[in-house]
Image (spheres, rainbow, N blue to C red):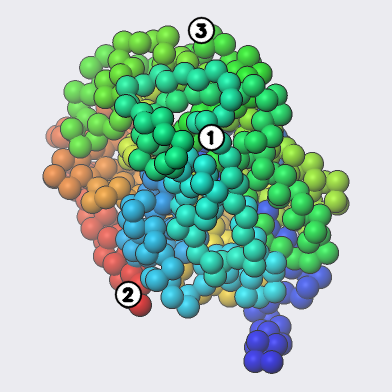
Amino acid sequence: MRFFSALVLLFMTGLVSSAAERPNILFIISDDLSAEALSCYGNKQCQTPHIDSIAKQGMKFTRAYCQFPVCGPSRAALMSGMYPQAVGVTGNGSSENFTKRMGDRPSMSQLFKENGWYSARVSKIYHMRVPGDITKGVDGPDHAGSWSERFNAHAPEWMSKGEHIHLTNEKLRFEKETHYGLGFGGAFYVVKGTDPEGAAQADVIASRKAVELLEAHKEEPFFLAVGLVRPHVPLVAPHQYFNSYPSEEMSLPPKRENDWEDIPKAGISKSSKSSGLEGRIAQQKQVLSAYYASVSFMDDQVGRILNALDRLDLRKKTIVIFTSDHGYHLGEHDFWQKLSLHEESTRIPIIMSVPEKSAGISQSLVQQIDFYPTLAELGGLQIPEHVQGKSFAKLLDDPSQSIHEEVYCLRGKDHLLRTDRWAYLQYKNGTSELYDMHNDPQQFTNLANTPEHQSQFAEMERRLTLKLQTIKAGTLPAN
């Protein structure tokens, strides 16, 4: 009775839209996906027609950044609307802290659930260990309060039938009785599956469940969050997807001789040298082939969900979002995978289609924690006080406007501050990097120690100090 009275009060005060006005939200997030891999972001090799179709109807953000280049803390930031150190999740191992630290403060989807939306999770939204939590079919460190219902995708991952190839130098433990600590989390391990439909794979299971939920809940407002685990390793896809990307035809990113000379040791990420790919150009191209095959396989599952949305005539009242948890290196600077604070690892795709809003492209700086206030505003809901992000809803009407003067990304005790022109990377050992993103978007020339850029360096250092003070001020108290 108290809930009904509170809901009536919210309607009367205008904090909740009427049922007829409340938009549906379809939130699709891919795992370990580089924006560089999407054809709508300029990739000439990898084809992603279904994701591209969202961009054609909606707003594509070209300068969007994650809050942490690792799954657990980036997803905690996304769902809380808070910076990682503010919500207390600063690594995959601390993902369990989310529920305790949030307490009775609502997560993004929980805000909608508490205001009358059906809220469901399909597969990986909060952190899940891939492949372990997928092969075991369990929740992982989820947040139960976020969902009306939740569904896991139980799949074979590296145990899938097909041609198996291990392209890097990790020592793997092939023990089917154990799901964790097998070494697959960072290995470029490839499976060209024998099942042309990939019916047993996590993303097919997830897209099928998403379609079922769309059909079951089409008459009520919903917040449907769908997590697709590809292209996270292991790189598993039906064999025909690999045929579209012959490895010998793959183009590696441009290299610069002596590229690492001005990158501090703390800025060197997982590299060709450390993973056993150094000098092995054929194997590096095989990685690209497998990664693009996994992306295309994932894109087809996005298409399955979008087709259902259209078939059910839901598109006209549904906000559709596609994004990734963080970026990913595919050989830039001879770096691979995530964890780096450089551009390819921290930049994410954000594509958003909103009913009655025009398509466009925005170069405004935005970041992951902005999703929460943006969707709350579009849903007619009051933004909770704990949220540190800023709504970018106004960019949907005028993409030329500015939301942030700077965006921020954390990695352990290292920091990235990104302004319109400058990228400043500061490491805990006192070393740093400074890049002019207008003149050097691929970050080949570190200007941190050049005399003519010391005033700019000092300004970025000052701004980072202020940013960290702001973040600390918004830190949630322990419950």
Inter-mark Cα distance, 1 to 2: 37 Å
Dot 3: within a 10 Å radius of its alpha carbon, few (fewer than 14), some, or many (20 or more) residues?
few
Is there any visible trace of residue 473 in the rendered image? Answer: yes
Identify which residue, 342 or 73, lies in the foreground: 73
Dot 2: within a 10 Å radius of its alpha carbon, few (fewer than 14), some, or many (20 or more) residues?
few
Is there any visible trace of residue 252 in the rendered image? Answer: no
- Rendered residue at 22%/55% (across/down): 462
Q: Which residue is mark 1?
A: 157
Residue 248: assigned label: 3
Residue 375 occupies quadrant: bottom right
Mark 2 residue type: Ala
Mark 1 residue type: Glu
Give the x, y percent position of residue 69: 38, 44
- Rendered residue at 29%/32% (across/down): 269
The C terminus, quarter of image: bottom left
- Rendered residue at 40%/71% (across/down): 100
Q: Which residue is mark 2?
A: 478
Give the x, y percent position of residue 223: 67, 61
Determine whether, in the image, residue 391 is placed left or right of residue 187. right
State whether residue 224 is above or below residue 196: below
